[in-house]
Amino acid sequence: MGTGYLFSMKTCLALRHVAFEDLGSFEPLLQAAGYQVIYRDAGYDDLTTLDPLAPDLMVVLGGPIGAYDGALYPFLETEIRLIAARLAADTPLLGLCLGAQLMARALGARVAPNPAGREIGWSPLTLTPAGTASPLGELAGTPVLHWHGDMFDLPPGCVSLAATELTPHQAFRQGRALGLQFHPEVTARGLERWLIGHAAELSVAGLSVPALRAATACHAPGLEARGARLLARFLDGA
């Protein structure tokens, strides 16, 4: 890897866009599974030096920008190239929210604002038969956190795994890569940072911070337990 890190153990490279949208509950689980977690911050670290195939696992995290905003944020095009290289090599890759949208773009699919508007809050997924048979089956009936205003078309050759009323494609799989439009990694404690960092978006959307906090307190513990099983199955398949 161009940064000079030695990968003597399993490594997880996490591409992060804002500091508070990190691996959340997934980080200690990855460490317990024997992964060294390395963050690289888009817009700050030089992503052009990264060897996309060096890490055992790459996770592309969420953020409040569009996957189509490469003219404003040139590092997005670098990320898409890194993602495309891992997809072409069929190496383990997990995309969360913006990460899934960047995966969709790398596979040639359209990403655009959702005409139904922002989807922010807790609700369960509607799983397809393929989704039920996949690691997402662990989330059946479980409310998950949605926090996005964009949507992606299903990439060519990929399998749709889940949907919601507002978003027709919430998850897809290609080989050993999994793209999730929602956030299975969030914790109740971690979401407090989101409520601060996304205060302007919540205000524009007319959403209640206390109501979102209360919903998170209700649903986050169950998601954390189910999310752990989802991640374990994904890692087994990876």
Image (spheres, rainbow, N blue to C red):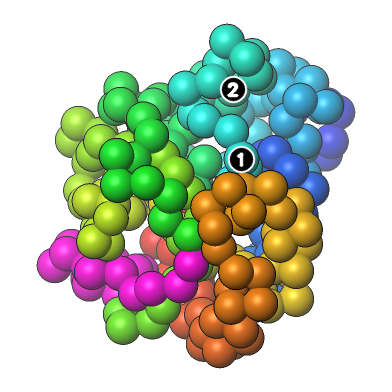
Label 2 secondary element: helix
Q: Nearer the viewer, residue 107 or 183?
A: 183
Label 2 crowd (10 A; few <14 / some 14-19 / many >=20) = many
Taking the magenta stretch, the answer to whether it contains residue 136 is: yes
Q: Which residue is mark 1?
A: 64
Q: Residue at x 84, y 36 (%)?
A: 5
Of the two numbered discs 1 and 2 in the rendering, the one whose residue sits closer to the viewer? 1
Q: Amino acid at mark 2?
A: Leu
The quadrant of the image that shows the C terminus is: bottom left
Q: Nearer the viewer, residue 97 or 238?
A: 97
Label 1 secondary element: loop
Q: Which residue is mark 2?
A: 76
Above or below, 126 against 96 in this view is: below
Q: Residue at x 62, y 42 (%)?
A: 63
x and y, in percent, of residue 121 in the image: 48, 67
x and y, in percent, of residue 235 in the image: 49, 63
